[in-house]
Image (cartoon, coloured by chain):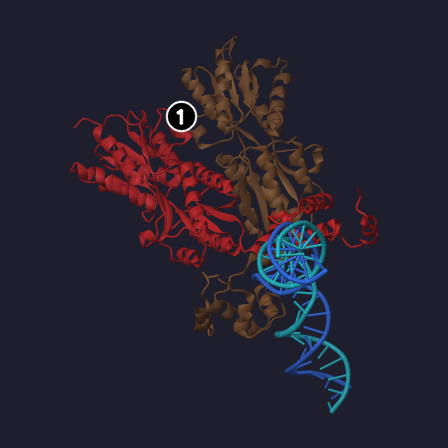
Chain colours: A red, B brown, C cyan, D blue
DNA sequence: TGTGTTACTGGAAACGTTGCCAATACGCTG
DNA sequence: CAGCGTATTGGCAACGTTTCCAGTAACACA
C-alpha cells in the first residue's frame, strides 16, 4: 500500500533530500493512536490490549519504523552497552578474551563496544573518556599502565562499574578484576626447568609495572628460592611485550658470557621475537636451548619442536569478566575478583639441561 | 569553591542517590550565562568573546561537567561514529584490518565501534540492524554470506554509506569496496608451483560463495589453463575457512589415490588445520609435500621450513576502507573501489615436484 | 542626537524517546 | 441507578543538547 502523501511530498521536495526520519510519531499517526501507546507496545508493557498491539505493530511495519537508540538511551538514562578496551586486538589472546566477554554480555541483553588502545596509555585515557561521554553502563579493560595518574583519574570519574583484566590498581581490593594465576603457572614452569637440570634460566617479559610481569617474576623467584638457588639476575629482561623486544633481549642473552640454557618468553609476541633471534643465531630449540612461552597459540603447537607453554583459558577470562560486570550492574556491591587458573603444557621444546 | 546548594540537597536526599547528571545547565548557572553560550563555547563557534569563553571554561572545570554524546548526537543528527563488523576478530588478519581502519577514522575525527559476527550470517544481520538503530554514520564490513537475502535487506535499509571488505554483492558496481587481488596472487603461486614441476596441486578454501574463494579459484584455473593443463578437479576442496576443515580436507587428500604433491591453504586458520593433518600423517613440509598459504602471519615465517605465502597488506586494506568511507561521508557519490595488490613470498615450503 | 552596523548573547524550539498522571470506558456490586 | 474498581489509553513533561532568531549594547558616523 503506497504512502498516501508520497506524491505530495515528492512534488514539494526541492531540497536536497533532508531525509526525514520515520519516528514513533508517524507510527502513532498511521495507527491512529497516541505516541505513548506506541512506546508501550515497543517496550511490551503489561497493560496494552491485544488489538492495540496488533494495530501498532502493523503500523510499524507499514511505515518502516526504526527505533532510535540514541533517543531511547538518552531518555532512559542507560545505554545497555558496555565498553571494552583492549591493549592490542591483533593479539589473538586479547581477541579471545573480548569474544568471551561479548558472548556473555549479549546473552544478558547488553551489547559491547570494542576499542583498541594499542598499548598506548594516552589512548587508554582518551578511550575511557570517550566511552564515559557515550554513557556506557560499564567498562571492561586492561589498562596499559597500572600506575599512570591520568588513567586512574579518568577511571575515577566513571561512576559506572569497571572490571579490570589482569590488572590491579593501588589499594589492591578497590577494583573488581579477573586475574590469572601467573605466579603458580610460572612456578610450575620453572620447577619443570629446574627438574630438567637447568640453572641458567632467562625470563623475558614486559614492563615490571604490570601485574602479569610482577606475578610471573614472583613465581620465578619462588621456584628458585624453594631450592635454595640464587636468582640469575643477569638473565631477567623486562621492557615490553613486543616481538622487537623479544628479539633484542634474546640476542643480548645469547652473546653475553655464560648465556642461558633455557628461556621463558612472557607472551606470544615476545615468543615471536625470541624465535627469530634463535633462528638468526642458529640455535635449535630443544636441542641447543630449552624454551617456554606463555599462552597457547597455534604457533606454539605447530612449531617444531612444539613449544612448552603456560596456558590459561582466554575465552573463560572474558566470560568471567562479563560475569563480574553483570553482577555489579545488577547492583552487586563490593569489589569482586575471579582468579583464572594456569596450567603447564609440556612439549618438546623443554629438554634436559647440561649436566653439571 | 563549594556548591552553595549542596548542603540543602544533601539534607533533602533520602532517595538512594539518583546521581543527578551535571549538565550544561549547571555550567550556565555557575557561569551566570545562557545555555546557548555554553554550547557555543563547547563547539567553538566564531562569535564568542574571549571573556565569555574563559568564564564558561572555568565553570566547566568548577562543576566537573562531562558532555553527553547521546544528547549531542540526537540533536545534531550525526554520531561521528562508524561501525565495523568483523567476521572473526581472533583472526589476526581481520584484527589488523580493523586497526588500520580505526586509525584512519580517528584521524578524521570519527570513532569506530568494532563488533564481531563470528562468521555467523544471522549475527551479521542482527549487528547491522543494531548499528543502524544506533545511528552510525557509516559502516565497514565483510559480510559472512554475500548471497543471503536477509543481510542484503538489512544493508538496504541503511541509508548511510557502506564499504565492503573483500566482498562483492549482486550487481557488481553497486557497492563500494576494498578488494584484494586474490586472482593474481593465486595465479603467481600456482605458476610458481607449476614451474617447480608440480601438477597435482590441491586448493583448500572456504565457501565458494565468497569473493576471495571465487577469485582465488579463478587465478588457479587461469594458471593451469595458460599451460594447457587440465584442472585437478578432485583436489579442490571448498567448505569453510576453519582449522577443522583444513585438517579434514588435508586428511582426505592424503589418503586418496593419487594424492597431491602440493597444497595451497586459502587462509591462516586453514593452514593450521593443514599443518596438523600433515603432522599427523608424518609428512614433512617441503620434502614430502610443498605448501603455500594465504596471508603472512608469524606462524608462516617461523615454521620450519618457513612457508611460502600469498601476502597482502592487511592494515593498508583497513586504511583504504576507511578512506573510501570518509570520501562517501564527505558527500562523495558513486560506488568507490580500491584494489589491494597481493604478492608471493617464496620460502622453503615450496620445493621442486616429482620428476615426471 | 539619531541611525546604522557590528559583535555578541539570551530565549526557546526542536531532536525521538519514555514514564508519570489523568482521563476514559467498561463491567460489576449494592 | 449510583458508585466503584479495573483495564486501557492519551497528554505532557522531561532527558541534554544544538541552533535559529531576536535582542542588546557598544560604537562609529552623519
The subunit letter for the residue under badge 1 reads: A
Which of the two residues, B136 or B198, is positioned nearer the viewer here?
Answer: B136
Q: Is residue A20 visible?
A: no
Neighbours of disc 1 within 10 Å: few (<14), some (14-19), many (20+): some
**Residue B109 location, x and y as percent?**
57, 53
Horizontally, residue B284 falls left or right of residue A347, namely: right
Residue pictured at 23% horizontal, 37% vertical: A257
**Residue A302 location, x and y as percent?**
40, 25
Image quadrant in which you'd find residue B43: bottom right
Helix, strand, or loop for circle 1?
Answer: helix
In the image, residue A272 sits, relative to residue B63, either above or below, namely: above
Which of the two residues, A18 or B44, is positioned nearer the viewer here?
Answer: A18
In the image, residue A310 sits, relative to residue B289, either above or below, namely: below
Q: Tell me the quarter of the image containing the N terminus of chain B.
A: bottom left
- The residue under label 1 is A302
Residue pictured at 55% horizontal, 35% vertical: B87
**Residue A47 location, x and y as percent?**
62, 50
What is the number of callouts on the image? 1
Which of the two residues, A203 or C2, is positioned nearer the viewer here?
Answer: C2
Q: Is residue B227 visible?
A: yes
In the image, residue A213 sits, relative to residue A192, either above or below, namely: below
In the image, residue B121 sits, relative to residue A106, either above or below, namely: above
Horizontally, residue B170 falls left or right of residue A146, namely: right
**Residue B284 location, x and y as percent?**
42, 17
Horizontally, residue D20 falls left or right of residue A303, namely: right
Amino acid at each position: 500500500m503506497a504512502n498516501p502523501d508520497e506524491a505530495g511530498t515528492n512534488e514539494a521536495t526541492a531540497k536536497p533530500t533532508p531525509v526525514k526520519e520515520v519516528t514513533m510519531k508517524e507510527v502513532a499517526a498511521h495507527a491512529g493512536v497516541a505516541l505513548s501507546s506506541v512506546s508501550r507496545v515497543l517496550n511490551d508493557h503489561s497493560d496494552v490490549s491485544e488489538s492495540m498491539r496488533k494495530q501498532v505493530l502493523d503500523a510499524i511495519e507499514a511505515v518502516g519504523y526504526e527505533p532510535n537508540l540514541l533517543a531511547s538511551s538518552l531518555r532512559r538514562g542507560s545505554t545497555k552497552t558496555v565498553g571494552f578496551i583492549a591493549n592490542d586486538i591483533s593479539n589473538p589472546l586479547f581477541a579471545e578474551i573480548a569474544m568471551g566477554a561479548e558472548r556473555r554480555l549479549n546473552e544478558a541483553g547488553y551489547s559491547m563496544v570494542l576499542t583498541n588502545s594499542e598499548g598506548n596509555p594516552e589512548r587508554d585515557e582518551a578511550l575511557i573518556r570517550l566511552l564515559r561521554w557515550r554513557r556506557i553502563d560499564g567498562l571492561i579493560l586492561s589498562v596499559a599502565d597500572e600506575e599512570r595518574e591520568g588513567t586512574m583519574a579518568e577511571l575515577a570519574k566513571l561512576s559506572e562499574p569497571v572490571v579490570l583484566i589482569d590488572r590491579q590498581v593501588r589499594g589492591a581490593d578497590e577494583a573488581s578484576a579477573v586475574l590469572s594465576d601467573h605466579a603458580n603457572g610460572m612456578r610450575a614452569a620453572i620447577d619443570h626447568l629446574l627438574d630438567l637440570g637447568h640453572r641458567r634460566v632467562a625470563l623475558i617479559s614486559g614492563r615490571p609495572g604490570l601485574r602479569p610481569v610482577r606475578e610471573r617474576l614472583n613465581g620465578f623467584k619462588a621456584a628458585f628460592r624453594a631450592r635454595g638457588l640464587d636468582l640469575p639476575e643477569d638473565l631477567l629482561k623486562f621492557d615490553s611485550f613486543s616481538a622487537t623486544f623479544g628479539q633484542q633481549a634474546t640476542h643480548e642473552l645469547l652473546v653475553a658470557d655464560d648465556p642461558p640454557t633455557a628461556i621463558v618468553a612472557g607472551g606470544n609476541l615476545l615468543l615471536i621475537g625470541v624465535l627469530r633471534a634463535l633462528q638468526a643465531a642458529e640455535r635449535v630449540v630443544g636441542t641447543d636451548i630449552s624454551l617456554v612461552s606463555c599462552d597457547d597459540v597455534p604457533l606454539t603447537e605447530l612449531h617444531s619442536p612444539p613449544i612448552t607453554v603456560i596456558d590459561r583459558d582466554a575465552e573463560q577470562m572474558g566470560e568471567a569478566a562479563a560475569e563480574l560486570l553483570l553482577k555489579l550492574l545488577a547492583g552487586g556491591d563490593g569489589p569482586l575478583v575471579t582468579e583464572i587458573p594456569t596450567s603447564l603444557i609440556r612439549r618438546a621444546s623443554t629438554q634436559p639441561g647440561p649436566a653439571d
